[in-house]
Image: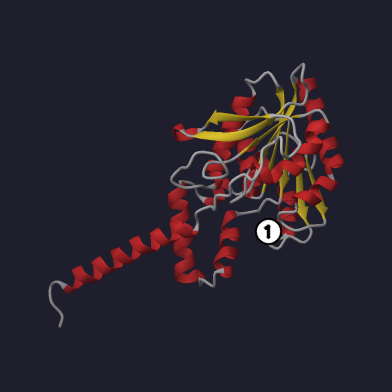
Amino acid sequence: MYTFLTPILVLGGLLTGLVLLNYILRRGLRAPRIAHSASLMQHGLSGREVWLPTQRGKRLFGWLLPGNADAPAPAVIVLHGWGANAEMMLPLARPLQAAGFTVLLIDARNHGASDADDYSSMPRFAEDLDAAIDWLKTRPEAIPEQIAVIGHSVGAAAALLSAARRDDLAGVISLAAFAHPAAMMRRWLAAKRMPYLPLGWYVLHYVQHVIGHRFDAIAPLNTLPRVACPVLLVHGADDSTIPVADAHALFGRGRQDTVQLRVYPGEHDATDELERHSAELVAFLRACMRAAGASA
């Protein structure tokens, strides 16, 4: 029977449903935390554990691998992807340190051994990367004017976002970056068998509300053209998480005088496969460091 309480009850039910949906979304989008399984020494690498400050009073865990025991060296910061950690990127650190680069591998907030925060997002990955860059500039192991960054997946998108906002990086290597977060989210929704209307539409708008950024403003398609330093886009030909078409789309938006594209065999997380192509990555970084040193 309809009473004056009926609209109130309906509204209360809708609000309760939205609160529950938002809670489920937050939990479903939470990054899994994977602990490190071994120390640098156990991996046969020379370096040490470090802690550095980031936003919101949090701390980041990292591994610092010096490239030169006696003097500052060109440096590379390596940032993992969603749900990964610094240890998973160690196959890249080996050839970089062997080539004479100081290497800093960090865990983003809510990942690896770093501090927890209320949520993770690509812009927060970029905040953590910015904190690592600023910290490394003060360290005796690094030449401040010769710092490059390498990011994987969400970490790659964060590297491009960070580089678009600053002019003090020597270069960027983007590994398996997505072209636009909205397209990536729609692929995630499709994998979960969620219809775009109305549920998917709400999810995309809710995520943008939570992270405080419009997807268009942080999309690599839109940040890459603003990056002044050289960029190497690397993507796996067999990537089933982020299609290689995203890499070609990004390359088409980049400055043709500073952006390069390499497509190698392998899947999305093929870090070991990338190690086989480390000579080309090292050559790119050395060229970036020479150019940065000459203009310093």
Looking at the picture, tell me which residue is in the foreground, 95 or 290.
95
Q: Is residue 15 shown left or right of residue 44?
A: left
The N terminus: image quadrant: bottom left
Residue farthest top in this picture: 70
Asked if one can make out residue 255 in the rendered structure from this viewpoint, the answer is: no
Q: Residue at x 58, y 49 (%)?
A: 34
* x then y, percent, for residue 225: 68, 42
Q: Residue at x 85, y 47 (%)?
A: 276
* x then y, percent, for residue 238: 77, 61
Query: Which residue in the protein does label 1 denote?
Result: 242
Q: Residues within 10 Å of mark 1 (few under 14, many from 20)?
A: many
| Circle 1 SS class | loop
The C terminus: image quadrant: top right
Looking at the picture, tell me which residue is in the foreground, 209 or 39.
39
Residue farthest left in this picture: 4
Above or below, 73 against 270 in this view is above
* x then y, percent, for residue 247: 73, 53
Asked if one can make out residue 123 in the rendered structure from this viewpoint, the answer is: yes
- The answer to which quarter of the image holds residue 126 is top right
- The answer to which quarter of the image holds residue 291 is top right
* x then y, percent, for residue 188: 57, 63
Above or below, 71 against 261 in this view is above
Q: Amino acid at mark 1?
A: Ile
Q: Is residue 181 shown left or right of residue 200?
A: right
Q: Residue at x 83, y 31 (%)?
A: 99
